[in-house]
Image (cartoon, rainbow, N blue to C red):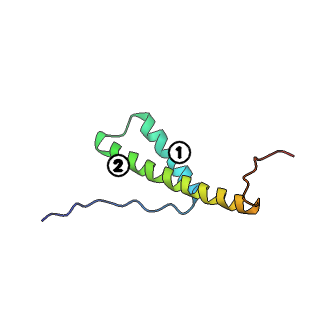
Amino acid sequence: MATANKSISPKPRDYESALAELEQLVERLESGELPLDQLLGQYQRGADLLKFCRDKLAVVEEQVKILDQGVLKPWSDS
């Protein structure tokens, strides 16, 4: 029985590095220069990075709610 040799992309170090990689990936995808066999893998990596970023933002949002006694307040300049 043959096993699939599926490479697993490393988890990003932090939100900023994930966002930077995602931005670069979007540029490559939009350029139309990726070969078809790489396109799906890169799209999946982008989906993983997007989920990572959204999860990190959700955690921060919950922390802000706790700091503001459960009410998420809009940011203001004042």
Q: Residues within 10 Å of mark 1 (few under 14, many from 20)?
A: some
Q: Earlier in the sequence, mark 2 or mark 1?
A: 1
Closer to us: 33 or 67: 67
Count of numbered circles in the view = 2
Name the quadrant containing residue 71. bottom right
Closer to us: 40 or 24: 40
Name the quadrant containing residue 33. top left
- Give the residue type at disc 2: Gly
Judging by the rendered image, the residue that carries numbered circle 2 is 41
Instruction: Give the secondary structure at mark 2.
Output: helix
Determine whether, in the image, residue 1 is placed left or right of residue 17. left
Considering every residue shown, the one lying at the far front of the view is 70
Assess whether mark 1 and mark 2 are in contact (beta carbons under 8 angstroms).
no
Residue at image coords 43%, 62%: 10
CA–CA distance in space, label 2 to label 1 = 16 Å
Judging by the rendered image, the residue that carries numbered circle 1 is 23
x and y percentages locating residue 44 in the rendered image: 39, 49
Instruction: Give the secondary structure at mark 1.
Output: helix
x and y percentages locating residue 68 in the rendered image: 77, 59
- Where is 29 relative to 75, above or below? above
Residue at image coords 50%, 50%: 50
Q: Quadrant of the N terminus?
A: bottom left
Residue at image coords 56%, 56%: 17
Considering every residue shown, the one lying at the far left of the view is 1
x and y percentages locating residue 9 in the rendered image: 40, 59
On residue 52, the disc is none
- Give the residue type at disc 1: Glu
Residue at image coords 39%, 45%: 43
Determine whether, in the image, residue 41 is placed left or right of residue 46. left
Determine whether, in the image, residue 25 is placed left or right of residue 20. left
x and y percentages locating residue 26 in the rendered image: 48, 41
Determine whether, in the image, residue 65 is placed left or right of residue 3. right
